[in-house]
Amino acid sequence: MSRWAIWLPLGLFLAFFALFASGLLKPDDRLITSKMIGKPIPQFSLPAAASDRPTLSSKDLATGKPRLLNIFASWCVPCAAESPQLMALKAAGAEIDAVAIRDARPDVDQFLKRWGNPYSRIGLDARSSLQIAMGSSGVPETFVIDGKGVIVHQHIGDIRADDVPVLLQKLAEAGK
């Protein structure tokens, strides 16, 4: 019995080391897939979040033309960082609407003045109820909505330069 007791700590250490090494060699899949892909956008009607943009409702997203729906906030640093890419998407012909989360109109106005305004419409989701209903967990997030108001793609996080062609392709596919 005492011979096994001597080797038990070494055996436990080797088992722990093997488990740890297997996690390093084969990491978990970190891709988050939305449960809302393929489903219609929830019904909503939001007040205007910016002084110079109209309100936003689910009907505005089902007009026959695919579009992007960007969820952002004026207090969000990555939202400011993605502004040049949103302007590039707009310049490439993408129709972009937005939802401002837990924000105030003067703050949204100031954010758009500083970073540019690629949006056609901006709704104010003061309590994050639409954000939660869409399965969004943070800001920024961008959804590709087809012409019928169905969510076909979700981009989590800020849009980077290499994401622009992917989003344009998803928009083109949504228009077919």
Image (cartoon, rainbow, N blue to C red):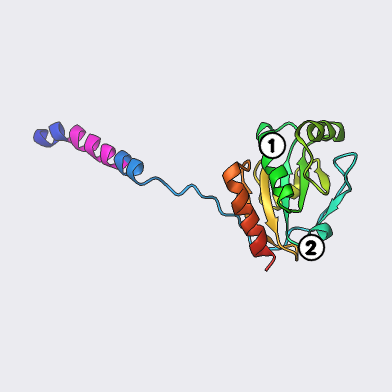
Mark 2 or mark 1, earlier in chain:
2
- Which residue is painted at 63% across and 43% down in the image? 159
Mark 2, residue position: 62
Q: Circle 2 — which element?
A: loop
Q: Is residue 69 left or right of residue 137?
A: right
Residue 51: % across, % down: 90, 39
Mark 2 neighbour density, 10 Å: few (under 14) some (14–19) many (20 or more)? some
Q: Which residues are magenta?
A: 8-19
Viewer-closest of 98 and 44: 98
Going by the numbered disc 2, the residue's amino acid type is Ala
Residue 92: % across, % down: 70, 51
Residue 8: % across, % down: 18, 35
Viewer-closest of 42 and 71: 71
Give the position of the C terminus as an image quadrant.
Answer: bottom right
Residue 152 visible within the image: no
Label count reads 2
- 169 in magenta: no
Mark 1, residue position: 79
Residue 17 visible within the image: yes
- Which residue is painted at 73% across and 48% down in the image? 91
Image mark for residue 48: none
Residue 7: % across, % down: 14, 34
Point out the residue furthest to the bottom here.
176
Q: Is residue 133 above or below residue 110?
A: below
Q: Is residue 52 left or right of residue 82?
A: right
Viewer-closest of 121 and 175: 175
User: Is the magenta region chiefly helix, strand or loop?
Assistant: helix
Q: Quadrant of residue 59?
A: bottom right
Give the position of the N terminus as an image quadrant.
Answer: top left
